[in-house]
Image (cartoon, rainbow, N blue to C red):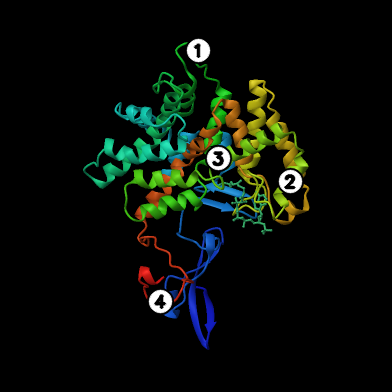
Amino acid sequence: MSETLKIEYNGNTFELPVIIGSEGEKAVDITRLRQETGFITYDPGYANTGSCKSCITFMSGEKGILRYRGIPVEQLAEHSSFVETTYLLIHGVLPTRRELNHFSVLLNDHSLVHEDMREFFQNFPRASHPMAVLSSMVNALRSFYPELHTVEEEMDMTVTRLLSKVRTMAALSYKISRGHKVVYPRPDLSYCANFLNMMFDTPVRPYVIDNDLTKALNVFWILHADHEQNCSTSAVRLVGSGRVTLYAAISAGIAALWGPLHGGANQAVVEMLQALADSGASVKSLVARAKDKNDPFRLMGFGHRVYKTYDPRAKIMKAVCDTVIRKLNIKDPLLDLAKALEEVALQDPYFIDHHLYPNVDFYSGIVLRALGIPTNMFPVMFAIGRLPGWIAQWKESMDDPEWRLCRPRQVYIGPPERAYIDIDER
Ligand code: ACO
């Protein structure tokens, strides 16, 4: 017999079905709660709310586990490529050699953007934040690539276009913002190498592809590829539930990701470390500020809604960081500061009691900086990485027979009914 959870109120007992996930996670099904009891639930920030059933990503905040379609992220980071991981997330299985080849060719074939789009990029003020540009231009893609005839054709083509064009648009936008000559994607280069080439190749200084740096970018994007129902993914699902185009849903995801509490944290970490270096203040004083309840400052790159232990992605990112710095033979004072900060924070009772550990953003900014990515583009790098996850989650929601328009309720605590007062009598 299936399990139930009983609620008792005013002498009445209500039984709610229990759902058990494939990793033993328990949820109580409240879909009939309001109808049967008149109650709704109250859960600010949805910390206890399961918004869907999903087969895509499993994470355990207590054990520090992250798996895409059942495969540990550590294994994917070691053996896979970003394109292969993208296929896995969207199609649910690892591709055969033939499927992977076909998928890569498809991404390459659609990697150019409509030439007319360049004018749009050119007309954004030079100081625009790249996330504002990307979010607008992804939404604008629909105007350049109108709807196709069948739903399947439309879905497959939109997914392909987004995966291939967003990367091109990010590099194009960077080049134009600098007043540099735009570099087109090359068919002979892999997805990640192509991006680095589009960003850094110039007519006077050809970009030399380095396999270790390309691997670092692959790992960076694999680690960001999905993270179940986080803020931006929930935005994609929520906006998508109104049956908007995938372009509009992804544009909403990019907007949600921008914030410093979410995908903007990698930028915020580097800015925090830079400010610390510039001020000459001590690491301990920064930790003291983060603990001070009268100071709104938080240690960027620390803490996570789900992980209450070391973020498994942060461990991999830290190792990538060391490799990239060694490979480029650079000395980044921010890396030394980051390590010192981590050491102090991890021994501090406040951070121990609050289960605050470095998250993926703590070291990722230093990796991106070493690769030559400008600081304000860090959230864009996150967005390109998260694209497969957003698409997979959106696709799953579209195919889900239980999926409905997302429309939470509220507990109204405003004034009770009162009469309108004429303006002369107020
Ligand atoms: N520095 C100092 N204190 C912190 C931090 C931090 N980075 N993060 C949480 N806390 C403290 C809070 O002050 C609070 O303390 P209290 O209970 O004594 O009042 C407690 O820990 C819980 O904090 P919440 O904000 O309730 O935790 P929540 O789960 O909502 O927040 C979040 C998670 C937003 C990530 C938070 O840890 C944070 O702001 N971190 C810094 C920003 C950051 O790195 N974001 C990236 C997240 S990962 C990602 O999106 C890819």
Secondary structure under tag 3 reads helix
Question: Which residue is label 4 attached to?
Answer: 418
Identify the mark at residue 82; answer none if there is no mark: none
Q: Earlier in the sequence, mark 1 or mark 4?
A: 1
Name the disc covering residue 205, or none.
1
Residue at left 46%, top 55%? 54
Separation of marks 2 and 3 at Cα, in angstroms: 27 Å
Instruction: Compare marks 3 and 4 and give the one earlier in the sequence.
Output: 3
Left or right of residue 262: residue 252: left
Query: 363 above or below 109?
Result: below
* Amino acid type of the residue that numbered disc 2 sits on in the rendered structure: Val
User: Residue 327's image quarter?
Assistant: top right
Mark 2 vs mark 4, CA separation in Å: 49 Å
**Mark whose residue sits in front, 1 or 3:** 1
The relative height of residue 418 versus residue 63 in the rendered view (above or below) is below
Which residue lies at the image location 53% right of the left edge and 63% below the top edge? 44
Q: Nearer the viewer, mark 1 or mark 4?
A: 4
Give how far apart the Cα atoms at labels 1 and 3 are: 31 Å
Tell me: is circle 1 under 8 Å from ligand 1.
no
**Residue 142 appears left or right of 208:** left
Q: Residues within 10 Å of mark 4 (few under 14, many from 20)?
A: few
